[in-house]
Amino acid sequence: MRTLALVLSVLLASGSLGYSKKPPIATQKLAPEAKSAVQAKELSLVRVNVTGQPFDYFRPWQKKAPFSKRALGAVLPHDRVLVTADLIANQNYVELERAETGDKSAATVVVVDHEANLALIEPNDKSFLKGLQPLDLALDTVVGDKLSAWQLEATGAPVVTEGIVTTIGITRYPADVADFLTYRLSIPMQYRDNSYTVPLVKNNKLAALLLRFDPRTQVMDAIPAPIIAHFLKDASSSKYQGFPSLGITFFPTRDPELREYAGQKTGSGGVYVTNVEAGQPAAKAGLQAGDIITAVENHEIDQNGNYVDPLYGKLGFGNLLTAKVYVGDTVVLHVTRGEKPLTLNVTLEHRSEDDYVVPPYNIDEAPSYYVLGGLIFQELTRQYLKEWGTNWQKEAPQDFVYLDKFQSELFPEGHRKVVIISQILPANGTLGYDDFSYLVVKKVNGMEIHSLGDLAQAVKKPMDGFHVIETVDDPKQLELSVDEVAAEAEALQKNYGLPASQRLP
């Protein structure tokens, strides 16, 4: 598989602008070229105020403490404002604020794409953005270009900081489901209370949006205009489709022994397909594990998985399958299978979060759960794993991390979920079970469990007066008395503040 490594020493997966405890840097004196940007900014930005409450995946029946966020949104045509999806995740209320007057209007989220980390909002008052000049997109940014980060002081005074694009490549966004085009900049960004979303501008056009920033190294990753353009074009249709997915993993073919193993006698380019996910576009087109993809359309793929982009030079070929095409498009893959060249026509689709065995995100959705005699059952999701913090891949239960990382290989049939015992509440029926949380459920009352819906059906058929829960790991089997579960149900709900004993998908 590919290893995608960001060289940021601190990754702010939330997309917000981090800052150190050092005293704030004094506002820079604006160069003449920056002054025109400031004038344009006053006609192109609005403050975005968001309040909300995230769901608590450790206690799935309740929410966490309320939050508030403050950001800048880029004004676009058709009275819409562009922000990051992270900003409006789990929102209860979104409000726009005119920077120059302080006027406010409630706003509605129109389209959100958590994979690309982009969202469109619009004011409820249709005249609220009147007089503001919408920003066009700058689609021609290359390495070496200067981009200006636009921010505002609390007083409304402008702050413009210039940075240089040092790298353009393919990286993972916070949702961690696909490779997207990314600009990397060296920029001395300053913290402001509206810096959760920061527009980056080139010649008074929107070139990118802040994705993450490391204040120690002053390195920023940004969502580039081509990804924004793809999002906006799709959002203009009657139904938003999302970015397409091929449904494969692959490995470089630099190793001549790997090429020989794959039967590649001639040529030295292409990538080795390590896995093809069942039911996804590549599988439907006939691609197989062990194939070598040598080209997409007329773009040859080298042994590192790069093609030559006319604007950016060498770039990961994932860009050809995200920024360049749309759901429903057909792309031609040129493949070698053994010594035989093949041409496969792949009709692209978007992969819904529900299609994953372990969903990568469940934002804005209340987590499902089932309480049975003090045992808390949940479906494993990455949102649950992220409750262990930014270092969740090391801190969360490693069995669960493994299931998330290799889900397509472990569950090639798909169309199921992984049900876990996430915790055990102290009760008479759970005495002695205190140390048995973080278990994967295999069967309940003899029935295979592939979802919480399965579990709800299984508990209707106890075995000889007991609920028998079989787990993948030790203790292998837990037993709960049906009578004791029923007798304690009301007390459990009262003692632990459970609004209900279950919330099913």
Image (cartoon, rainbow, N blue to C red):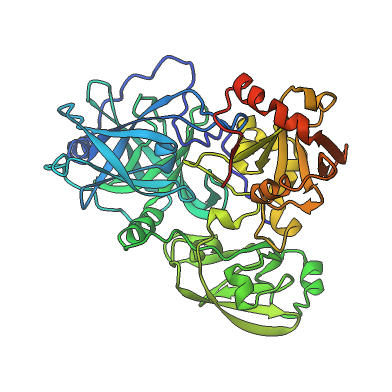
| Residue closer to the observer: 281 or 483 | 483
Residue at image point 82% right, 28% down: 433
Task: Check the picture and name the quadrant holding the N terminus.
Answer: bottom right
| Residue closer to the observer: 81 or 88 | 88
269 is higher (above) or lower (below) than 495: below
Residue at image point 36% right, 37% down: 198
401 is higher (above) or lower (below) than 484: below
* Residue 184 in view, yes or no: yes
* Residue 434 in view, yes or no: no
Q: In the displayed structure, does residue 295 sit left or right of residue 77?
A: right
x, y percent for residue 120: 33, 47
Q: In the displayed structure, does residue 190 sit left or right of residue 347?
A: left
178 is higher (above) or lower (below) than 194: below
x, y percent for residue 486: 71, 32
x, y percent for residue 114: 47, 47
Residue at image point 47% right, 50% down: 182
